[in-house]
């Protein structure tokens, strides 16, 4: 993947004090790989950056499993507290100097408050699925959407995970279809990347 267009957009955005970059894409589409490539380039260029991964801010299991709702609904609407993240993350990254967010610990299904200091002038990258949902979209200056076929993404899962096809069919894929049909993220993105994102 040639990310020169993205680098140019970042350099233009950094002429201001803050530039908020969103990396959107469905599960296993290559978001983390792209973020890691950008991180190396930013460090080489001396550009300060702060990175937020939405999966660090998911809800407790009892709020997103066995709630009485359909599984896809739990994943799309209950995996994250969209309004909380809107207020405490997305609404504050343009001007805040320190953000305090509930950080999820998967090992014991708990949260702790984590402070993140943000330099006055920097790039802020927010990466995660369903990033263009209505609660969050307008708080981002530039959005990249990684468009990767479901079959390719599924092959990237661990073999043990791929055995749970029912969970994908009932939970993940239905939620993805809802996002694609109602939000139409390819149309809302500033840049759509269809090629695989290769590691550095």
Image (cartoon, rainbow, N blue to C red):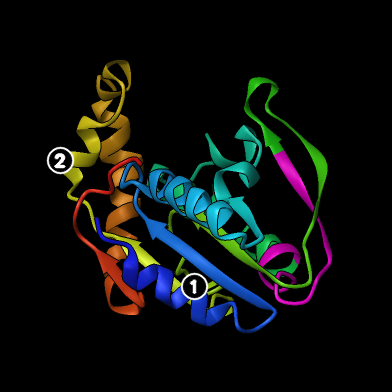
Q: Nearer the viewer, residue 143 or 111?
A: 143
Image x and y of residue 68, in percent: 51, 42
Question: Looking at this view, is 156 or 123 the one in front?
Answer: 123
**Element at badge 1?**
helix
Which of the two marks, 2 or 1, is nearer to us in this view? 1
Tell me the residue at 70%/63% (across/down). 89
In whole angstroms, how far apart are the C-alphas of marks 2 and 1? Answer: 31 Å
In this picture, residue 100 sits left or right of residue 42: right
Residue at label 1? 10
Image quarter of residue 124: bottom right
Does the segment drawn in magenta span residue 97?
Answer: yes
Image coords of residue 200 (percent x, y): 35, 41
Q: Is residue 101 magenta?
A: yes
Residue depicted at x 56% and y 44%: 55
Which image quarter: residue 172? top left
The vertical placement of 110 against 96, above or below, is above
Q: State the image coordinates of residue 72 (x, y, percent, origin top left).
A: 38, 47
Depth order, front residue of 154/31: 31
Q: Give me the residue at 66% from left, 36% from top.
A: 60
Residue 35 image position (x, y, % from top left): 46, 50
107, above or below 147, in the image: above
Bounds of the magenta span?
88-103
Q: Assess whether mark 1 and mark 2 are in contact (beta carbons under 8 angstroms).
A: no
Label 2, on which residue? Answer: 151
Residue 183 appears in the figure: no
Q: Quarter of the image containing the N terminus?
A: bottom left
């Amino acid at each position: 993947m040639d990310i020169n267009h993205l680098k140019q957009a970042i350099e233009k955005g950094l002429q201001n004090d803050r530039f908020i970059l969103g990396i959107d894409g469905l599960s296993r589409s290559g978001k983390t790989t792209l973020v890691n490539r950008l991180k190396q380039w930013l460090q080489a260029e001396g550009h300060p950056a702060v990175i937020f991964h939405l999966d660090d801010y998911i809800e407790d299991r009892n709020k997103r499993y066995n709630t009485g709702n359909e599984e896809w609904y739990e994943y799309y609407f209950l995996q994250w507290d969209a309004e909380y993240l809107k207020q405490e993350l997305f609404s504050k990254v343009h001007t805040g100097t320190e953000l305090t967010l509930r950080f999820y610990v998967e090992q014991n299904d708990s949260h702790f408050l984590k402070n993140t200091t943000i330099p006055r002038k920097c790039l802020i990258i927010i990466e995660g699925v369903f990033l263009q949902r209505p609660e969050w979209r307008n708080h981002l200056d530039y959005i990249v959407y990684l468009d990767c076929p479901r079959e390719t993404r599924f092959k990237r899962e661990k073999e043990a995970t791929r055995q749970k096809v029912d969970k994908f069919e009932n939970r993940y894929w239905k939620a993805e279809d809802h996002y694609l049909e109602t939000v139409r993220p390819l149309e809302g993105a500033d840049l759509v990347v269809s090629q695989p994102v290769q590691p550095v």
